[in-house]
Image: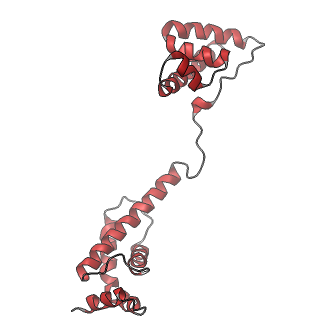
Amino acid sequence: MSDVTHILSAIDRGDPKAAEQLLPLVYEELRKLAAQRLAHEKPGQTLQATALVHEAYLRLVGGAPEHPWSGRGHFFAAAAEAMRRILIESARRKKADKAGGDWQRHAIIDAELAVDSAGDDLFAVDEALTRLAAEHPRPARLVHLRFFVGMTLEEAAEALGIQARTAYRDWAYARAWLRRELDRSS
């Protein structure tokens, strides 16, 4: 039985000093494995091979392993899998940060049309709505129900006999169309 296999068996039995003995024996091989993994990553990867080795090693021997190691090959296969998972977690964190992290998203369709009902804006909206109704009747009816009746999007969808998702799309389209028309007329 090789030294690595012997130490892995000791770790499985709960020997607290075995993990300390294992790292010097497997460190160089784990570092090569980590370097190979990182070589396949996109440029700009900030995780270093040493950090990847340490994180993977902690995951492998830091707690009680789910299954006893059947040998050297099993340990290194598990190490490769741990490194893969660490790289995926790192990429997900970066992607989440790029996508706004924990910022709250607000859909543009939640915002209401802001129009001064006492001024000329109301006439401009009415003219634009008439043009919208001529080209796209369903979104225009949706705007009527939302803007003039005060229905929620879900209520207006039910009144029109359409799915809520369709109403969301129509509302977004109508708002953009009306904004463009109102910008042209002003």
Q: Quadrant of residue 153?
A: top right
Residue 8: horizontal and vertical position, in percent? 31, 87
In this view, 59 is above or below 119: below
Can you name the residue that lies furthest to the right here? 118
Q: Quadrant of residue 15?
A: bottom left
Chosen colour scheme? secondary structure
Which quarter shows the N terminus?
Answer: bottom left
158 relative position to 27: left or right: right
Can you name the residue that lies furthest to the left here? 1
In this view, 65 is above or below 167: below
Residue 88: horizontal and vertical position, in percent? 39, 61
Residue 28: horizontal and vertical position, in percent? 32, 83
The foreground one among 19 and 186 is: 19
In this view, 155 is above or below 62: above
Q: Residue at x 35, y 89 (%)?
A: 13
Residue 10: horizontal and vertical position, in percent? 34, 91
Q: Residue at x 51, y 23 (%)?
A: 167
Number of numbered discs: 0
The foreground one among 44 and 12 is: 12
The foreground one among 94 and 144 is: 144
The foreground one among 179 and 81 is: 81
156 relative position to 95: left or right: right
Q: Residue at x 30, y 88 (%)?
A: 9
Which quarter shows the C terminus?
Answer: top right
